[in-house]
Amino acid sequence: MGIGSWAGMWFALGIPIIAIMYLLKRKFIDTPVPSHLLWRRVLENTEANRPWQKLRNRLLMWLQILAAALLAFALMRPFLWGEAGTGGQLIVIADVSASMTARSGGESGGAAGTRLDEMKRRILEDTRRADGGLTLIAMGSNPQVSSSRTDGRGAWEQAVEALKPDYGRTAYRETLSLASAVAQGQKDARIVIYTDNQWNERTDDLALDAPVEIRGMGETGSYRNAAIEQFGVDDGERAARSAVGVVANTGGGKLELRAELSGDGRPLGAAELTLEPGERRTVAFKAAGEARTYRLSLAGIGGDASPPDDYAADNDAFAFAKSGQTPSVLLLSDGNLFLEKALRLSGAEVTRMDRAAGKEDKAPPLPGGKFDLIVAEDGLPGYAQSGDWNDLLRSAALWIIGGKADDGQPGSRRVEVSVHPVTRYLSLSEPYFGALTAGKPAGLQTIVTIGQRPAIAAGTENGRRELWFGFNLQDGDLPLSSEFPVLVSSSVSWLTGGGGGGLGRVVSGAAVDVPIAAGAENALWRPMQGTAFTEGAGETAAVRASGTGADSQQSAPAGSPSPSQPAPNIPGLYAFEQSGQGLEDAPVYLLDVRPDLSESAAPSPETPEFAAAPGGETADAGTDTQGRSRLPLTIPLAALIAVIMLTEWGVYRRGRSI
């Protein structure tokens, strides 16, 4: 038996009120007096009301007390557990969030496994007697109907066993809304949620169209977990680089563990930690050494190969050191001291070449050396668009500044800056940019506008990064602004960052911008280290461009790898590898994929609540630990109260108070 609402206990106060009323009941006492009848009336008036008299065994009083007690009990909405096979549409929501991969101790002496394994077993056991339609919805980053109104037992078991964890940010509200839409219009539909209650979204304002039951997985009090919340390396000298990480104890017990630093697979240092529940500790490694990829991982103390906690997905983090090579820049300019000085301040090695060194019909000889970036001031020279110069431009990032001024200028000079690595930390609201030029490349995305006209655009063109300034630096006072060196440094850093290396850290399933090499026909994500490599996750094919939308804005031919890629689902270190004719030495990009950090927290002991359904009744949320459904007792209790009231009326009509 269970109770739906303990608020009905307040109505039990009517029981002592009934008893007090009988204590204060007026009672006439027959007392013989040897006198005249007039004396009898006087004595009746003085002895008629005797408060706080002793309670007597009266049938009417006990019937009233019983009716009040049953009324209070009925208002508490009691119910009995019945077998799950009660008919109607059963909608099962399976929580496949990252926290469901945490280890669980098992129930009833069962073998230890993950919460996901426990959930699968519970779903199959609880639905073995279901005689209605079954619908399975996987609650992950994108709600998915894994099985819709399945009647066959074999198909249902196959759908349940095929559930896999989703390490992205879980869409709780979207999943519940989908389940409510499925239940709408279905007679006797029920929603059963299997979850560890580790929710990061509120649901008390969400109204559902069916009764809800929540069946918990895992044990809250015994949860043990340590998470790497932050990790990075500085940009110092290669041998003197420092690595810093933040480790937090998000579980309910004290943890002793070992933080290990490695670089390109080589051990670089370790530190032993003792963390109390809720404690965070910063771990620093000075002179970590030179490496391309750094890894911070958590392990048990004493050489134990098993994970130091119950949730292993957040025990690894990766960081990428910036390339120690100085970017080589070829500046095609007739002379701009401010621009050349700002390029050198960014750390680049600048080779300046006079634009007038060649004529439109005769190209000057190519400068010696290999360049990472070509900066063309006053537009791109005509001789640079063919022959050997064209091959040089295809092999390096390109920055075009200015050109011929456009005849039509905007009336407003209001500057609007979009979010982009080039314009990070900049407002560009004070300097005057001068006249705007025309000819923005079609494949680039506008990141700065002046009077709603493109002023700065950036993007990827033919596998290389390209930046366009739609104004001449000599026509305005931007070079005199304090933001100019920052703008040039950010531009050089972004333009020269497309030759391989680290793509940074993202949450599983998030969008990632990847430079696609010219001529790339295929690409894939290859797991290198971390959870994905340990679990034997296979290679994931890259998403291909459709030729529309974001792909068309970045000039990705239809059928080739798209510059906008979703990150792989399983956390770990991945390498993005491209292949195609003549791409034997294509750059390889590394990506650190992390699970949603909110999944590292301990499960909440509180059951999620829901708003009142459209019909006015609050969705009934509770935990069924035996795989049964609720049979309400409100109607039988109401019938019993009616019978008691009729009996009380019969006693009252006889005029007896016994």
Image: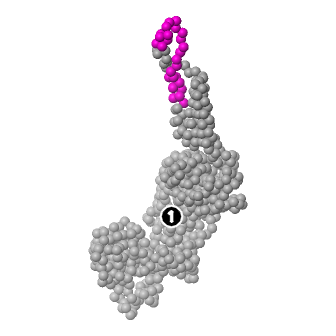
Q: How is the image coloured?
A: one colour
What's the residue at 39%, 93% (across, down)? Answer: 362
Tell me the quarter of the picture where residue 656 sits: top right
Q: Nearer the viewer, residue 626 or 463?
A: 626
The x and y percentages for residue 88 are 65, 54
Residue type marked 1: Val
The x and y percentages for residue 55 are 56, 21
Q: Nearer the viewer, residue 131 or 30?
A: 30
The x and y percentages for residue 368 are 43, 84
- Quarter of the figure with the N terminus: top right
- Is residue 302 in sight in this rendering? no
Instruction: Report if residue 232 lies within the magenta region.
Output: no
Query: Mark 1: few, some, or many residues within 10 Å (few <14, many ≥20)?
Result: many
> What is the residue that sits farthest to the top in this orientation?
34
Q: Is residue 250 above or below residue 25?
A: below
Q: Nearer the viewer, residue 239 or 10?
A: 10
Q: For mark 1, give the secondary structure.
A: strand
Q: Is residue 643 left or right of residue 464?
A: right
Tell me the quarter of the picture where residue 643 sits: top right
- Is residue 615 in sight in this rendering? yes
> What is the residue that sits farthest to the front in this orientation?
37
What's the residue at 42%, 71% (across, down)? Answer: 493
The x and y percentages for residue 295 are 53, 61
What's the residue at 57%, 58% (across, down)? Answer: 184
Q: Is residue 78 above or below residue 429?
A: above
**Residue beneath label 1, please?**
506
Instruction: Report if residue 28 lies within the magenta region.
Output: yes
Q: Which residues are magenta?
A: 15-42
